[in-house]
Amino acid sequence: MRESVTNDTNQNELVKRFCSVRDESLAIIEPLTVEDCQLQAMADASPTKWHLAHTTWFFETFLLSVHCKQYAVFNPHYKMLFNSYYNGIGDQFKRANRGSLSRPGLDEVLAYREHVDSRVIELLKTDVNPHIKDIIELGLHHEQQHQELMLMDIKYNFSVNPLFPQYKTSLLNSQKNQLISNPLILSILNKPLLILAQMPTMNLHMITSAPNTKY
C-alpha cells in the first residue's frame, strides 16, 4: 500500500513538472504577436513558432511514437519540418529557411502542443517505467534549452527592426507569468540587447547525451 502511494506521488510530481516546463514556453510568447513568432532575422536564429513546434516534436518522436501503441501522429509532415539535426530520424527542413514556413500557422502549432501534451499526461498517469521517465527528463531539459534560445532569438530579431520594439518584460512581474523561474532565462531578459546580439546562441544549446546534434 505504501509503495502504491509513493508511486502515485512520484507520478503526480512528474506530471506537474512536465506541465510547468511546457507552460513556461507559452509564458515566453505571451507578449508576442503572431508576426513576431514568425521572424527569423538571420540564418543562425530560428522563429519562435519553430521552437514551439520542435520541442513538441521531440516528445512526439522519442516518447509517444515509440511507447504508445495507439498513438497517431498529429501531422506526418512535421517529422521533417521540425526535425533539427537528428539524422537518424530522417530528413530535415533547411535551418536557414525556417522563417519561410508560414504554414502551419501559430494556432496549429499551439494545437499540436495541446495534442501532444494531453497524450503525454495520459501516459504519465499510468505505471511508467524508468526509461520513459528518463526520456521525459531529457525532453524537459531540451525544452528549457530552447526557452533560452527563444529569448535570444526574439531579442535579436527585434534588434534589426528600426522601430526598436521591446520584449515586454514587465509581464514577468504579473501573477500570470510567474511561471518563468529559470535563472538563465531571467538573466537573458536582463542583458542589454547589443550584448545578446554578439553572443553565439550555440553555446547555450548543448545536449550532453546527444553531442552530435544541433538545434
Image (spheres, helix red, strand yellow):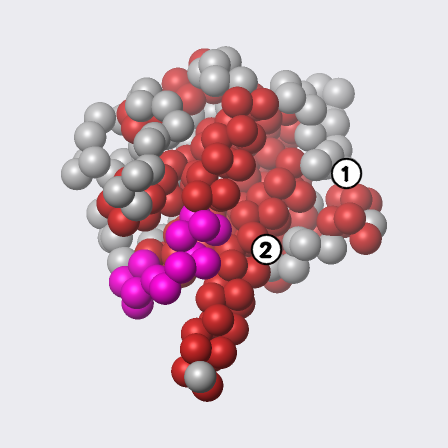
Task: Tell whether position 127 is magenta.
Answer: yes
Q: Residues within 10 Å of mark 2 (few under 14, many from 20)?
A: some
Q: Position of residue 40 (x, y in %)?
A: 51, 23
Residue drawn where x is 56% and y is 60% of the image: 16
Height in image: 6 above or below 81?
below
Q: Quadrant of the C terminus?
A: top left
Q: Position of residue 176 (x, y in %)?
A: 78, 48
163, 131: nearer the viewer:
131
Height in image: 156 above or below 203?
above
In the rendered structure, the answer to whether residue 135 lies left or right of residue 9 reads left
2 and 1 marks in contact (CB < 8 Å): no
Q: Quadrant of the N terminus?
A: bottom left
User: In whole angstroms, how far apart are the C-alphas of marks 2 and 1?
Assistant: 21 Å
Residue drawn where x is 43% and y is 77% of the image: 4
What secondary structure is marked by label 2? helix
Could you tell me the amino acid type at mark 1?
A: Lys
In the rendered structure, the answer to whether residue 161 lies left or right of residue 48 reads right
Q: Position of residue 214 (x, y in %)?
A: 32, 42
Residue drawn where x is 21% and y is 36% of the image: 89
Q: Which mark is residue 74?
A: none
What secondary structure is marked by label 1? loop
Between disc 2 and disc 1, whose residue precedes?
2
Task: Tell whether position 41 is magenta.
Answer: no
Height in image: 34 above or below 154?
above
Height in image: 201 above or below 35?
below
Could you tell me the amino acid type at mark 2?
A: Ser
Instruction: Check disc 2 and report the residue beneath it.
Output: 20
Q: Is residue 27 visible?
A: yes
Displayed quadrant of residue 66: top left
Instruction: Check disc 1 and report the residue beneath it.
Output: 168
